[in-house]
Amino acid sequence: MNSDQFAASLREKGINLTEQQLDQFETYYQTLVEWNEKINLTAITEKGEVYLKHFYDSISAAFYFDFSRPIHICDVGAGAGFPSIPLKIVFPHLKITIVDSLNKRIQFLNHLADVLKLDNVYFVHDRAETFGSNSQYRESFDVVTARAVARMSVLSELCLPLAKQGGHFVALKAVNADEELAAAKKAIYVLGGKLEQKFTFTLPIENFERTVIVIEKEKPTPKKYPRKPGTPNKTPIE
C-alpha cells in the first residue's frame, strides 16, 4: 500500500487526509525506520507494509467507533505508537496517553511527538498493572485502546480498570478473536465490562482478517484488579 492507495482507501471510508497529515505519516514512517535500527520497534519495515499493517490497521478502529469527539484515550502497550498515534494524526483533537513498560520506546515516542508536532500527547513509562492501580489514572479515560498486546482475558484486566464508567475499551485483534472473546467472557464481566459490538473485516490489498472489539464499561472495576505485574498473564480470569 503506497501513500496514494492509503489516502484513497481512507477516503472510501469517509476519512479525507490533508497534505499536512500525509506528510506526518511520511515523517512517521521515516522516523520509525531510523529508530528501528537502534531499538526493536517493529519487525515490519517495508514501506507498503507499514502503511497497510500499521497505519491503516490502526485507523481502522475509527471505521467502527466514533473518534470525532474530544475524548481522552489511553493506549496500553502501544509500542511504536499503534493505534493511538495514527488516530491522533487523523483526529488532532484527541488527547492521548500512552503507557509502555520499555523506556526506550517511550524515548522514541517523545521524539516522534516532537517531529510530528503533536500536542496533548503524554507518555508514561510503567507496567500496565501498576498504572491501572494508580488513582491518578484509574477509571479516568473515555476510551482505552490496545492492539496485539495480549489475549483478551489478559487485556481486559490491563485495560478495563483504566476506563471510566460509561467509557469504552476498544481492542484491535487479528486471528482467533472469537475464541479469545469467548475465553474472556468471565473476565470482561468481573471487571465491569460488557461486549457492545464486534466487527470483523479484511484489510485492503492483502485481505488479512481483522477484528475490532468494543467493550462498554458498565460498572466500576473491583479494587483488587489489576493484580500485581505478571499475574494477569500467568493466571488470567477464566
Image (cartoon, rainbow, N blue to C red):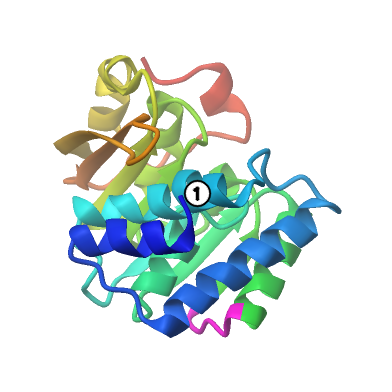
The residue shown at (23%, 29%) is 189
Q: Which residue is found at the position 31% from the left and 46% from the top?
A: 170
Residue flagged by tag 1: what amino acid is it?
His
Q: Position of residue 87 (x, y in %)?
A: 39, 64
Residue 199 counted in the magenta span: no
Q: Assign a secondary structure to mark 1.
A: helix
What's the magenta bit mostly, secondary-structure-wise? loop
Residue 49 vs residue 161, the one in the foreground:
49
Name of the residue lying farthest toward the left: 196
Looking at the rendering, the stretch of residues picked out in magenta corresponds to 116-120
| Picture coordinates of residue 63, whole percent (x, y) | 21, 53
Foreground residue among 175 and 14: 14
x, y percent for residue 75: 47, 55
Looking at this view, is 128 or 214 the one in front? Answer: 214
Residue 132 in sight: no
- From this view, report whether residue 43 is shown above or below residue 100: above
Q: Which residue is mark 1?
A: 54
